[in-house]
Image: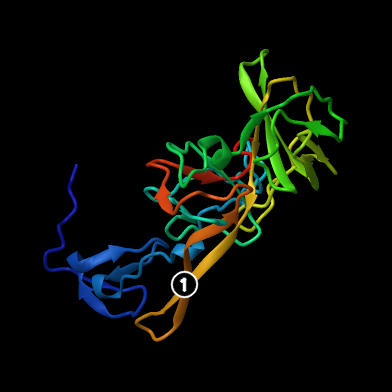
Amino acid sequence: MASYAQGKYALAISDRSGQVFPYREMVREWNGAYVHTSEFEPKQPQLEPKPISADPQGLLRARPARKALPTPSVLDLNPISTTGSNTTVTIFQERHQRKTGDFVRLYDVKQPVGGLTIAELEMSTTLKTAINKTDTTIVLDDSTKFPSSGFISIVTFNSENGENHTETIKYTANNTGTGTLTGVTRGSSAPSYGETPAATTARHHKVGNKVFGSREITIVEESFVNDAGSTETFSNKFTFVVNSTPSSTQRGGGYFVFGGPVNDRA
């Protein structure tokens, strides 16, 4: 069988321009046209677009967005400062971002400060009488450390799942003589960092359950002029009022003292 000639000296006419070119410089386009290499045009990609499906509208295991609960944060070293004969206590925490009107509870105070005991600084006591979900009077073993109004947190151990459940309770009156809190709103929540978290759930609480209090704070602001010439305001400390008058001027409390919301659990 005879083979084809290589076309070394042959000429060909372009289907596009009609001009004559060397045979060996001709190529075939995608549409079958026989053209010179200088005239070659690749197939336009938009003639065969890749199929694109619609954007997905939802996740397979989607969860609704929720606001994270505030958590205790570490205060400065020896963060508690008292002044003798002054019931206002100053707490130091660099750039804390809290707001005036927040309620703060102290955790893990390591030592007394200015004559104030750890129990008074942390405001801890126990429940004197059991309460059910609807009771609006709460009797504590000792309410002398607690403000005249505010928020408390009662901790109850759940033996079924081995977890502690807490309830935040608002009260408007405190009889320190009898340890009785009245004007109670059950299943409440206290403002923290300028926001009010989701309300807790009213529960049954037994005699001897731990009770923690909190104090309303006032932030102390400072300001400076930055490199751009604008004034910036910040706060490295806040204050609250205690019931007992400190006996001396002192700064202490130890390291890894925490300041946080009344209730640090869901």
Q: Amino acid at mark 1?
A: Glu
Q: Is residue 33 positioned above or below 188 on the image?
A: below
Q: Which residue sits at x=87%, y=31%? A: 135
Name the residue beneath numbered marker 1: 222
Most extreme residue toward the bottom, as rendered?
229
Image location (x, y in percent) of residue 57: 66, 48
* Residue sitting at the far top: 160
Asked whether 143 or 11 is in front, the reply is 143
x and y, in percent, of residue 104 in the image = 59, 48
Residue 45 x %, y %: 44, 63
Task: Please provide percent x and percent y for residue 175.
Answer: 79, 40
Q: Is residue 31 visible?
A: yes
Quadrant containing the N terminus in the rendered view: top left
Which residue is rendered at x = 30% and y = 75% of the image?
A: 39
Q: Quadrant of residue 203?
A: top right
For the point 44% across and 42% down, the residue is: 257
252 displayed left or right of 129: left
Q: Which residue appears at 70% of the width and 37% of the height?
A: 143
Q: Quadrant of residue 92?
A: bottom left
Q: In which image quadrant can residue 63 be found?
A: top right
Instruction: Please say which color scheme the image uses.
Output: rainbow
Q: Label 1 crowding class (10 Å Cα cut-off): few <14, some 14-19, many 20+?
A: few
Question: Is 97 displayed left or right of 252 in the figure?
Answer: right
The vertical placement of 224 against 1, above or below, is below
**Residue 97 visible within the image:** no
